Each structure stands twice: as structure tokens, then as C-alpha cells.
């Protein structure tokens, strides 16, 4: 995922009229700025932010203006499908094959699956490794999940909701630094940045956004591994 980030960064800088002569450190806004300046690439703060968001996959920050109702639903379950049979898995896989983040999200929590699995085959692959479950989208701009039961789904929904609520009170640079620091999974904060969800000019004091995002991914991974290992044990694998 870091390689993808660097590729997007190169493209974003090219659109600003700059090229890279050496590697850069994209793990924080300050580190990115320093490594760019070492190559004589000096950007105004707003341009630096725009380039950093683009590197995270968010090329158009805050393009979506949320209504009060949409803001309240940011972390609410948006889509839910039962996957109780291989036929269900194939149907759901076809239905959501065009969703940009379905495959990256489900695969990020399951390192035992091939990261090159085509999007329409991801849900069948997950079912084959864990058996039946629920495919859900936590908010229109949130993560896709595959859980064994409603309780697991509710836990992930609660953790994601905590991230959304904390990030909505953060400054842009606080959210951006947390997103840049998350290199091992798809950035949930970068997805939220498509909207004007941040309504505060203050800072989410005492809240570590990176820790909240990691808590979500850690839980998703733990659930997936538990179900995968249980399935392997039941079938003597």
C-alpha cells in the first residue's frame, strides 16, 4: 500500500509541475514537507495538503456537502447482504464488484488471501476461507466488512463510529497526519475527507485518531482470523 501511495504522490506532484529525484517520507505532513524541500520542492501549505490527500487516494477533498441527516448517518450501516451459501457469495460479489473499496478492505483484514484477487471474486474467497457471514458497508464513505454475526458487525460499527466522531472534531492537519501514519491498511480518514464532515476548527484533544483507526482494523483482523482458524480446525486443515 505504501507503493501505491508513492505512485499517487508522484502523479499529484506532476500535476503541480514538480518531479521527484529521490525517495520521500510520506508518513506525516512534516516528514513529507521536509523530504520534498530536500529536493527543492517547496509547496504552499494548502498545496502540500492537497498533494498529501491525493497520495492517500483522496483527489477531491471535501467535495461532498453533507446534509444534517447525511452527517448523522456517516457511521451507520448503509448496505447489508447475507452470505449463507456459495451462490450468495457469488451474487454479492457480482453486485458489489464495482465498489472501489470492497476488495481492498476485505483483503486488508485477511493476509492469507491473495491480494490480487479480482473484486468480484473476493466475497466468494472470503466465504471459502471463513464460511457464512454478513457483508456490510459502514456508512456511505466508510469501510466494507465481512462478519460472522450481528454482534461482530455491531462491534466494528461502534469502533468506526468512535473514529468518525473524534475525527469530526479534529483539525485537517490532525486528520491528515493520522491518515499518513496508517500505511498498512486502506485509510478510512482519507475516505471521510471526501465530505465536509469536519465541522470544528479546534482539535480533538486527548484523542489519537491513528489509534482509533488501528482499533477498528485490529478488531476486523481479529474477527477474520478467529473465523478462518475455526473453519480450518473444523475441516482438519
Image (cartoon, grey):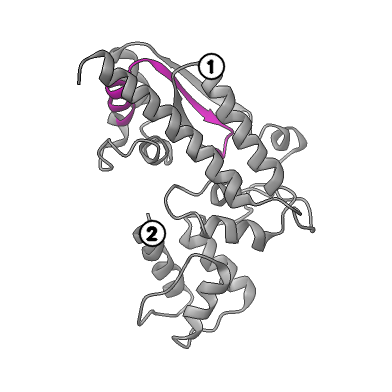
Indicate the secondary structure of the residue bearing disc 2: helix
Residue 25 vs residue 15, the one in the foreground: 25
Mark 1, Cα crowd under 10 Å, few <14 / some 14-19 / many 20+, is few
Mark 2, Cα crowd under 10 Å, few <14 / some 14-19 / many 20+, is some
Residue 229 vs residue 39, the one in the foreground: 229
Indicate the secondary structure of the residue bearing disc 1: helix
| Residue shown at the point (49%, 75%) measured from the top left | 16
Q: Which image quadrant is residue 15 in? A: bottom left
Residue 144 vs residue 68, the one in the foreground: 144
| Residue shown at the point (59%, 48%) measured from the top left | 211
Q: Which mark is residue 150?
A: 1
| Residue shown at the point (63%, 50%) measured from the top left | 209
Residue 48: x %, y % from top left: 57, 72
The stretch drawn in magenta includes residue 137: yes
Q: CA distance from mark 2 to mark 1?
A: 33 Å
**Quadrant of the image for the N terminus?**
bottom left
Magenta-drawn segment: 122-142
The furthest residue to the left: 237
Residue labelled with disc 2: 2
Residue 223: x %, y % from top left: 44, 27
Amino acid at each position: 500500500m505504501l507503493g501505491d501511495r508513492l505512485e499517487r504522490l508522484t502523479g499529484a506532484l506532476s500535476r503541480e509541475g514538480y518531479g521527484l529525484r529521490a525517495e520521500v517520507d510520506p508518513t506525516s505532513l512534516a516528514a513529507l514537507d521536509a523530504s520534498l524541500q530536500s529536493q527543492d520542492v517547496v509547496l504552499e501549505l494548502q498545496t502540500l495538503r492537497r498533494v498529501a490527500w491525493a497520495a492517500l487516494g483522496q483527489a477531491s477533498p471535501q467535495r461532498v456537502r453533507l446534509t444534517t441527516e447525511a452527517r448523522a448517518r456517516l457511521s451507520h450501516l448503509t448496505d447489508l447482504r447475507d452470505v449463507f451459501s456459495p451462490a450468495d457469495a457469488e451474487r454479492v460479489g457480482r453486485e458489489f464488484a464495482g465498489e472501489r473499496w470492497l476488495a481492498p478492505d476485505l483483503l486488508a483484514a485477511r493476509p492469507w488471501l491473495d491480494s490480487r484477487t479480482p473484486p468480484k471474486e473476493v466475497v466468494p474467497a472470503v466465504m471459502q476461507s471463513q464460511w457464512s457471514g454478513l457483508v456490510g458497508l459502514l456508512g456511505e464513505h466508510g469501510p466494507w466488512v465481512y462478519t460472522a454475526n450481528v454482534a461482530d458487525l455491531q462491534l466494528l460499527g461502534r469502533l468506526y463510529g468512535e473514529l468518525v466522531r473524534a475525527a469530526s472534531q479534529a483539525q485537517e492537519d490532525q486528520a491528515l497526519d493520522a491518515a499518513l501514519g496508517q500505511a498498512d491498511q486502506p485509510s478510512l480518514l482519507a475516505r471521510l475527507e471526501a465530505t465536509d464532515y469536519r465541522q470544528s476548527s479546534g482539535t480533538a484533544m486527548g484523542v489519537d485518531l491513528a489509534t482509533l483507526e488501528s482499533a477498528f482494523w485490529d478488531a476486523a483482523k481479529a474477527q477474520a482470523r478467529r473465523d478462518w482458524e475455526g473453519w480450518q480446525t473444523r475441516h482438519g486443515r
